[in-house]
Image (cartoon, rainbow, N blue to C red):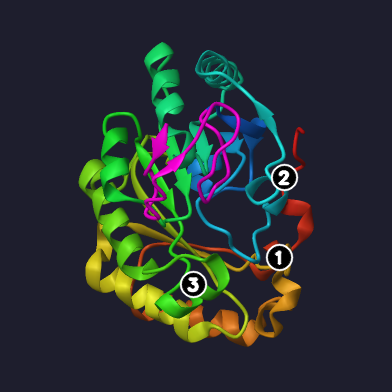
Amino acid sequence: MICNLCPRNCNAERDEYSGKGFCKMGTVPKIALAAPHYWEEPCISGKNGSGTVFFSGCTMKCVFCQNYEISSMGQGHFVTAKELSEIYRQLEEKGVHNINLVTATHFLDEIIKSFEIYMPSIPIVYNCGGYEKAETLKRLEGIVSVYLPDFKYGFDEPGVKYSNAPNYVETTVNAIKEMVRQCGKPCYSQDNMIEKGVIVRHLILPNHTKSSIKVLEIIKETFNDDVLVSLMSQYIPTANADRFEKLNRKITHREYDKVLNVLYSLDLDGFAQKLSSADKKFVPKWDI
């Protein structure tokens, strides 16, 4: 396979179990955990949990990634498209509210095959870093019900510095536009679980409130009430964050309140985490 699935357009050769592209992954999916997850947004986790499948590898390299053991170090085990379809079925039988694919883009061909084998009757959530190629996302139309992208930075400079992601802002905006085109405005079931729509996540970083405020302003100007916003305060220095002075601490109450007040002033609908969420106990334990 010659791969151009993500915005990097590596044009790199990938065989079944290894690759020469940015993600270093092969074409056979590699996963680190498949289990009900109870710490997503309330309308995703609900009472029974979200049926998360965490994929190894990533099209970004965020220096502060809480999942760095799987995203950068590639830990996990290989599964076929058939095995993936059985994982969906097993999670669905456990009563989860949805199937939640986490950082899956680099395995898209096999993931599409897995849904051709078995399509769950519950919503499919596509949980990603936001740095996506709109052309690739179009292949998921009719499969994904809910998109859950990050919008990490309001400026391109930190995108390059912290995630090795050039042209981050424009790329992410275009990706979210495609997600909104597919799913439309958020729709809920009778028990307030999201069935269709886009939830844009933003993680507040220490010493970067200007970037956070810019993200919220872009969302307001570009999407308004077409999306929900999930403002996240769970940042803790992990992976290589200690190499960057500005990232080597949790956010302060002052930083959190400053960004939260902008969220309210812009009248953006969505969710806001409590500062107590900044704790390693909320990071999943990988099944590797």
For image coordinates 33% across by 77% down, the residue present is 217
Where residue 196 appears, as percent x and y from the top left, is: 33, 39
Give neighbour class at mark 3: few <14, some 14-19, many 20+ (Cα, 10 Å).
Answer: some
Q: What stretch of residues is rendered in magenta?
A: 1-27
Can you identify the residue that label 1 sits on? 278
Front position in the image: 248 or 263: 248
Where residue 169 appears, as percent x and y from the top left, is: 36, 69
Quarter occupied by residue 105? top left
Circle 3 — which element? helix
Give neighbour class at mark 1: few <14, some 14-19, many 20+ (Cα, 10 Å).
Answer: some
Give neighbour class at mark 2: few <14, some 14-19, many 20+ (Cα, 10 Å).
Answer: some
Along the polypeptide, which appears first: circle 2 or circle 1? Answer: 1
For image coordinates 23% across by 46% down, the residue present is 184
**In front: label 1 or label 3:** 3
- The rendered magenta stretch, by its main secondary structure, is classed as loop
Disc 1 vs disc 3: Cβ atoms closer than 8 Å?
no
Please name the amino acid that badge 3 sits on: Val
Number of the label disc, if any, that sits on residue 160: 3
Is residue 269 rendered to the left or right of residue 34? left
Number of the label disc, if any, that sits on residue 284: 2
Q: Quadrant of the C terminus?
A: top right
Please name the amino acid that badge 1 sits on: Ala
Where residue 126 appears, as percent x and y from the top left, is: 43, 41
Circle 1 — which element? loop
Please name the amino acid that badge 2 sits on: Pro
Quarter occupied by residue 49? top right
Along the polypeptide, which appears first: circle 1 or circle 3? Answer: 3
Q: Is residue 120 at all visible to an observer of this figure?
A: no
Could you give the CA–CA distance between mark 2 and mark 1, rounded to whole angstroms?
A: 13 Å
Where residue 190 appears, as percent x and y from the top left, is: 38, 34
Front position in the image: 162 or 13: 13
Q: Is residue 20 magenta?
A: yes
